[in-house]
Image (spheres, rainbow, N blue to C red):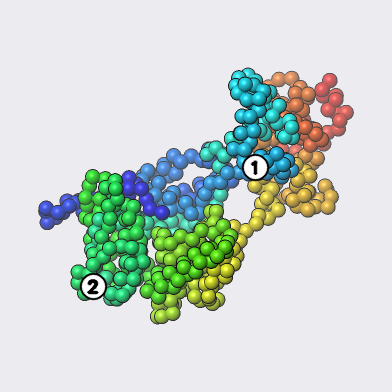
Amino acid sequence: MAFRRQDIAKTTRKDKEGGGPRKLYPRYLRDRTVLPKVELAIGYLDGMVGRRRGDLSPDLVLDLLGDPKLARCLLACLADSYRYRTPTFAEVVGEEAASALAAWDLLTPADLRAHVYLAANQTRAGVVPPAEREAFLGEVAAPLGLTAQAVESLIHLDAERNALLERIGPRPTAEDTVARYNATLTVSVLRHASTLRLELPGLAATAVATVCDRHGVEWRRTGPESVVLRGRRNAHGTWSNHGGRLARCAAQLIALAPATPSGEATVHLGDQTLAFPVDAKAVGPIRPKLRAVASVDGVVRGAVLADEVAAFRRAGGRLGGWTMRRALEPIAVDGALVLPEFVFVRGGIAVAAVPVPSGAERGTVLAALEVVGRARPVLALGVSGGLADVPTLPVATPPALLAALDALAEAVDPSPTPLGTLADELVGAGWVAETRVAEVLAVAAPADVPAAVAPLVAEGEVAHVPGFGLCRVAVLEDLQDRLLGGPLDVASLRAGVAARVGPGAGADALALHLLARGTGSWERPAPITGDEVDRRAA
């Protein structure tokens, strides 16, 4: 991940000596007064987990931080912790209805849209006037066991506005987010470099050669501890494509150097050619006290493992959905940094793998992995046990690697609890039938349901309706609006409830519940009999 060129916050100044290009100074976040604002932005995102993308307000985050460029960059830094996903059919209409749709080979919103379009071609000559839309969808929905409203929802389920926000792993902290912003800012600027001159005090020539060759970056030595890295312009005349390799190579060299490096890069941002001083401020975010970076031995071991994984796949071995990527950007948290040799990705989970050295720097690398492992999934290669928050793999064979990755993924994104499953279904559909609640919670008798769902109801967003199931309070309030502003029409109320949740005994129970509550609070118990309903209707 790197920031867009347009979003790089910077200041430029004239060269004091004159004649040279303007100096570029990225705006790092060093003032702790920004932390409360970042914490507010994280709190907003965390509070919107489970909500639709259309419900989020990007402008609110911009307003919180006050700087649009800064806001976009910080949101990019949070992209590994928060992601959007398309809801499943089961989350909207329940497992039973989703299974029925699967029997029709309708597994995705695109499948259902194609089914609807085919029906429109067959019965309406391909054109359905707005006035006939609901009736037409009802005709399509009936054989599928759905309502017209359900079909309307499902055919748009993969629209961007309907994607659900979810969090991966622990809640990020403001300090970690700022640390990642600062490290990524340096890397993002270096992506646009045509040349980079570095003084690397104490770094062996073999290490420089191994790292540059590993990233495919052209380099030459200009002094005992001085090197020049060269970028490569693409067919469009920009430097950023190959610049990703140059930036990662530079980050690895800077992190490996025993003493603080220095230098200068010539960068090209738009039509500007600027000089970027690679000073202590620029390299500081990449050189925290605790850092885990592959040395020469780690680079060689990583290359061997990459070849073994490739041979394993050619021999017919399966990676279980994992994709192996090499040489991504550094993973920075407050006080520590990891520059992985590999990142294994499956779905929304990314696991960084780092070869652990056996020399004097082993303790520092293990400490860095421990700190980063509390925030991001990390796998230590070449070490057996001894780490509390980081899984280890003594011998990284492909089968052992896959087993470790699967175990780590299960720990990061475990199977939902029964209450978590119900909470997810409530987010998607707004209600869960009593039979489904009993099935998920495995309760023996209906009388046991209230106690089992108490943790969900206690939050105040969900109510339990006997005989119907669980329902979001917002849905109940929407249905209750039918009781306001005019004479009571029980038949109309029943029809409206049935249209929303489907016909049957559950709809009748929900209608009775609404009538019993009238316009009052949801906490008031109000049992009602069938005779009372008939009396009110009369």
- Snapshot quadrant of residue 209: bottom left
Q: Give the residue at the far front of this rendering.
A: 315
Q: Nearer the viewer, residue 32 or 137?
A: 137
Check if mark 2's residue and mark 1's residue have beta carbons within 8 Å. no
**SS type, badge 2:** loop
**Labels 2 and 1: the sequence-earlier one:** 1
Residue type highlighted by circle 1: Leu
Residue at 74 percent of width and 51 percent of height: 440
Residue 367 in view in this figure = no
- State left or right for residue 410 relative to residue 72: right
Residue 299 in view in this figure = yes
- State left or right for residue 487 relative to residue 216: right
Q: Which mark is residue 384?
A: none
Which corner quadrant holds the N terminus? bottom left
What residue does disc 2 label?
A: 225
Mark toward the viewer: 2 or 1: 1
What residue does disc 1 label?
A: 107
- Snapshot quadrant of residue 385: bottom right
Residue type highlighted by circle 2: Glu
Residue at 28 percent of width and 55 percent of height: 232
**SS type, badge 1:** loop
Residue 456 appears at what percent x and percent y? 69, 48
Q: Residues within 10 Å of mark 1 (few under 14, many from 20)?
A: some
Residue 275 appears at what percent x and percent y? 21, 55
Q: CA distance from mark 2 to mark 1?
A: 60 Å
- Snapshot quadrant of residue 260: bottom left
- State left or right for residue 442 relative to residue 191: right
- State left or right for residue 404 relative to residue 102: left
Residue 91 appears at what percent x and percent y? 66, 44
Residue at 55 percent of width and 37 percent of height: 159
